[in-house]
Image: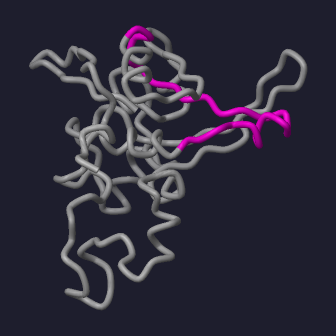
Amino acid sequence: MWIFDTDADGAEQPRDTGCPSCSSAADQIGNLRQLHVRNTTLVAVSRAPYEKLAAFRERMGWTFPWCSSYGNDFNYDFHATVDGRIAPVQIYHRTEAEMAEAGMPWSESMRGDWPGISTFLRVGDEVFHTYSTFGRGIEEFHSGYPHLDLTALGRQEAWEEPKDRVVPLGLHLGGPALRIPDEYDT
């Protein structure tokens, strides 16, 4: 949920803001009461130092728990950060060889953070990784998509049918008009 600038030597420096797509998803997180009464919680984890996370969370007015995995292997262990120099490459549950076979060969330009959701179960002092999803599997949590899909205008993206029904706004995940949520005029 963070953007890093990478220098020519491959060293990463975290920016002061989260990525627009992930921030859009985070903006959808509301009160966690219904999770808490079921002995469940939600926690966001990002690789940036906690000071940067806390300042951005304050700016955005978010109240959900947000932890930093800065300096540890959490993101690499669960394939939310991909860097073949640190851990074996795996994207969308595919190894580097499986990606090549599927027509999506690994390249160094793909190195970095990939959005994903993992769930864990704690039993006593033991913690079990029970589920992970990436790509389209996290769509329910982005940009109000479930609500937009119920409307006549839909997501207003170029791929929607019938063609030319709406003017694409460029607000899709990673789209050119997608911004940090508090940067919109509305």
Task: Tell me residue 39's x, y (percent).
Answer: 84, 33
Relative image position of residue 170 (x, y in whole percent) = 21, 61
Q: Residue at x 84, y 37 (%)?
A: 37
Residue sitting nearer the eye, 90 or 186 = 186
Q: Main secondary structure of the magenta part?
A: loop
Q: Residue at x 33, y 41 (%)?
A: 181
Along the horizontal axis of the image, is 97 left or right of 162? Answer: right
Which image quadrant: the N terminus? top left
**In the figure, 144 relative to 161: above or below?**
above
Q: Is residue 11 left or right of residue 67?
A: left
Query: What colour scheme has been applied to the protein in the rendered image?
Result: one colour
Q: Position of residue 41 (x, y in %)?
A: 72, 32
Residue ranking furthest to the bottom: 162
Q: Is residue 131 left or right of residue 55?
A: right
Identify the residue shown where x is 65% and y is 33%: 42
Q: Is 25 a magenta residue?
A: no
| Membership of 34 in magenta stretch | yes
- The answer to whether 123 is drawn above or below residue 171 in the figure is above
Quadrant location of residue 33? top right
Residues in magenta, as a range:
29-51
Quarter occupied by residue 157: bottom left
